[in-house]
C-alpha cells in the first residue's frame, strides 16, 4: 500500500501547528524557517521560567542538543515534562552524541527522566544512544558496523518510541514497523544544518499525525523531495539552500506523489 | 503633504549610525544584516558588564525579547538606562507578548523601569501590552477586536511614546499623529523574522531622525517597498529573502518616491 | 616564488579537519557553513563541561569574542588550554576590541593566560590589542595612523604568534615574514560577518598546515577569490552571499592559480 505522503503535508499546511523548539544556536534560524516554509508555526523559547507555558500552547516539542549547556538541558526537561503532561510528541535530536561525555550523559538523562517520543540522529549518534561503542567525528555521520535497521528496532523497543536514523537512506522504526525513505541528494551534505532541520520537519509532521513513524517518514520524504528538486537548479551549496526553501513552499500533490520513495517493512 | 521617505533613507546611508541590539538568537543575523544593508552599522552585545558602554557609542538601541531570559532582560535594562542617559532612542519589540507570563511580566518591567521610546509588535502583542485580554499563538499575528488605531493611540498616550503595530497595514502612532503604511507583500509572512528585522530597520531610522513616528514609518515603508520589488522576481521564500537584501541595497529616490504609500492622519 | 595556494585548499578538502569554534551568536551559522563549504568539518560547542573534550577531537580551535560574556570567555580559556596541550593551533578574532573595557580586558586575559597562535582583527582592533590608542566604532574597520605592517610585525614578535590584519589589503605577519593578500572585493563590506567567516576559514587552513602565516594567507586568498567571482553575478548583498558559497565550493586549481594575489616580503 502506497504511503499517502502528500496528505500529511496538506494537514501541516491546513492545521499550521505550533512547534516549540529548544534547539542549538547554529541552525536555530533554519530550524524555525523550515517549519514556517512548511506552513507550520515555529516558536523558540528556552527560559526555564517560561518553557512549560510555551509547550502548553504547542502541538509538538523539538529538542536539539547541538550547543547544549547544563542549564539549557534543564530547560529541556521542564519543557518536555509539560509536553508529556499535555500529551504532545517530543522529538529529540541527539546531535553530536558520542563526541563528549557531557553529550552522552545529557542524552541519557533526557531519555531516562522524560518521555521522548522520537529519537533522531545519524548512524553513529543513534548507535551511541543505543549503547554501541562508537566515536563521533564532530557532527558528521560515520559508519557503524552493526546493521542499522536492527539498531533502530532494538532502540525503539527498549525506549518504547520511534527511532529515526538519517543518512543516504533514512530508517524510521517503531515497535511494529520500519519505514525506509530513499529520497534525498548528496548536495545536502555540503551545507550545515540539514540534520537539524530534518528534526524540525519531523516535529511539524508529528504535530498533526498520531502515528509518529508515519509522520517522521512523510516529513523526511517531503523535505528530501524538495532537496532533489532544488539540486537541479543549484550551482552549489549557496543557491541550493535558497532553492530548497522555494521547493518546499512549492511542493504539490503531483510532484510529491510521483517522487516519493518510501518502503514499509 | 507627501512624506519625504527617501530623504530619511539617504540620511541613514550618509550618517551610518551605530545601532546597538539586544535581540533574539533566532533572527540575530538578519537583524544585523538588514541594518548593514540599509547602510548603518549594527552592533550586537549583551554582557551585563559591557552593554552600558556599548550603548554609549551607539545612536539607537533595539531590544527584542524573542528568546528572553531573566539575565538577558537585566542586560536590556542596563543598556536602556545608558541609552536614556545619552538621549538616544530605545525601540522595544514585544515579540511573543501574550504567549507566557514571563514575557508579559518582562515587557511591563521594561516599560515601567526604563524609558522606551518606540514600542513595536503585531496586533495581539500590542493589545496585550496595552492591557487588552488576548492570547498570542506563537509569534504569529492574530486578530484583535478593538480598533487597532485606537489601541495604538491610547498606548502612545499612556506611555508617552511611539507605538508601531505591524500587519497588512502598519500603524504608527505618537501622541499627535497617526501614520498608516500600506506597502508590503504577503510573501513576507512566509519567512521567519520579518517582524524582528522591521524593528531593526526602525532602530536604524530612529537613529537619524528625532520625529520617531516619522522615522518608524519611513523605515517600514522603505523595507516594504523593497519586499514588493523582491517578490516580483522570487520563486518562493528562499529566493525572496535574497532578493529582499538586493532590493534594499538598490533602493533609489525614483522607486521609493513612486512606490511609497504612507497616509498621515 | 609563487605561493602554492591551491595545494593548501586541496589539503583542506582531502583531510576534512574538525574545526572547533567558540564564536558569536550573530554569525555562528555562517562560521560553520563556510568551514563546511570549504570541505572541512565544523563543530560548535561552548559548555565549560565539554569544551576540553571537544578541542581534543579537533585539528584547530577558533575563538571569536563578538558576543562575549564572562562565562563564555571562561569556556574559551578551558578550550584553548586543551588545544594548547594537544598542540593544535588556536585562532582568536578580537572582534570589537576597542569598543568597550570588557572586550579589551578579555582579549588581554586570553592573550596572557593561554597560547594564541593567530590573532586576527581589522586595523583598529589589532591596533588596540597591540597597545595603540584607538576607538572602535562598532565592529567596522576604521583607519589607524601607524603603519599597519609595523603594527602586525611588532605584535607578532611580542606575542610570538601570527598576526592577521584584514582590510582592503590583508596583512599576515609572523616573526619572519609578511604576506600581503590583495584579493577581495568591496561588496564584502555590505554584508555582516565577512570578518568572522574569514577567521573560520583561517582556522580550517591552519588545521592542515604548520606554517600558520602561510595557512592564513592562503585561506584568505581562496575566500577572497571566491568573493571576486561571486560579485560578478550578484545584484546586491543577498545574491552575493549565496554566490559566495557556490564560488567557494567550485574553486578549482585553474581559477585559484590565475587569480591569486599574494606578495611575500
Image (tube, coloured by chain):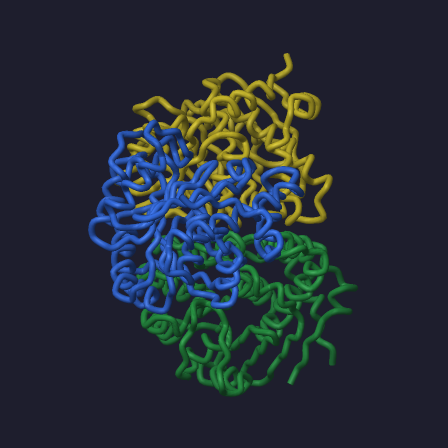
Chain colours: A blue, B green, C yellow
Residue C204 visible to the viewer: yes
The residue sitting at the front extreme is: A1
Against C4, residue B36 (above or below) is: below
Q: Position of residue A11 (x, y in %)?
A: 49, 64
Camera-side residue of B108 and A106? A106
- Residue drawn 48% across the image and 52% down it: A3
Against C128, residue C85 (above or below) is: above
Q: Position of residue A202 (x, y in %)?
A: 42, 53
Name the image quarter holding residue B134.
bottom left
User: Image check: A79 left or right of C99?
Assistant: left
- Residue drawn 51% across the image and 36% down it: A189
| Number of marks in picture | 0
User: Image check: B109 left or right of C153?
Assistant: left
- Residue drawn 65% across the image and 21% down it: C253
Camera-side residue of A175 and A199? A175
Name the image quarter holding residue C56.
top left
Residue C123 visible to the viewer: no
Camera-side residue of A126 and A10? A10
User: Image check: C49 left or right of A13?
Assistant: left
Quarter of the picture containing the N terminus of chain C is top right
Q: Position of residue A104 (x, y in %)?
A: 26, 39
- Residue drawn 50% across the image and 79% down it: B143
Q: Position of residue B63 (x, y in %)?
A: 45, 64
Quarter of the picture containing the C terminus of chain C is top right
Name the image quarter holding residue C51.
top left
Against B197, residue A197 (above or below) is: above
Amino acid at each position: 500500500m502506497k504511503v499517502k505522503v502528500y496528505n500529511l503535508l496538506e494537514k501541516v499546511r491546513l492545521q499550521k501547528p505550533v512547534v516549540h523548539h529548544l534547539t542549538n544556536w547554529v541552525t536555530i534560524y533554519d530550524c524555525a524557517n523550515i517549519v514556517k516554509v512548511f506552513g507550520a508555526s515555529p516558536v523558540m523559547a528556552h527560559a526555564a521560567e517560561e518553557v512549560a507555558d510555551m509547550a502548553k500552547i504547542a502541538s509538538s516539542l523539538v529538542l536539539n542538543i547541538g550547543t547544549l549547556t547544563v542549564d539549557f538541558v534543564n530547560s529541556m526537561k521542564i519543557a518536555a515534562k509539560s509536553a508529556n503532561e499535555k500529551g504532545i510528541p517530543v522529538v529529540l535530536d541527539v546531535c553530536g552524541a558520542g563526541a563528549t561525555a557531557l553529550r552522552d550523559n545529557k542524552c541519557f538523562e533526557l531519555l531516562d527522566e522524560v518521555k521522548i517520543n522520537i529519537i533522531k540522529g545519524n548512524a553513529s549518534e543513534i548507535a551511541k544512544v543505543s549503547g554501541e561503542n562508537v566515536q563521533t567525528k564532530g557532527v558528521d555521520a560515520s559508519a557503524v558496523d552493526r546493521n542499522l535497521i536492527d539498531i533502530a528496532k532494538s532502540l525503539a523497543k527498549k525506549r518504547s518510541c520511534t527511532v529515526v536514523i538519517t543518512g543516504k537512506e533514512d530508517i524510521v522504526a517503531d515497535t511494529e514497523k520500519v519505514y525506509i525513505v530513499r529520497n534525498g541528494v548528496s548536495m545536502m551534505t555540503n551545507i550545515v544544518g540539514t540534520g537539524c532541520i530534518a528534526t524540525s520537519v519531523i516535529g511539524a509532521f508529528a504535530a498533526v499525525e498520531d502515528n509518529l513513524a508515519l509522520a517522521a517518514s512523510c516529513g523526511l520524504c517531503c523535505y528530501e523531495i524538495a532537496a532533489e528538486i532544488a539540486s537541479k537548479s543549484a550551482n552549489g551549496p549557496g543557491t541550493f539552500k535558497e532553492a530548497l526553501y522555494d521547493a518546499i513552499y512549492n511542493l504539490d500533490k503531483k510532484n510529491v506523489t510521483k517522487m516519493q520513495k518510501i518502503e514499509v517493512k
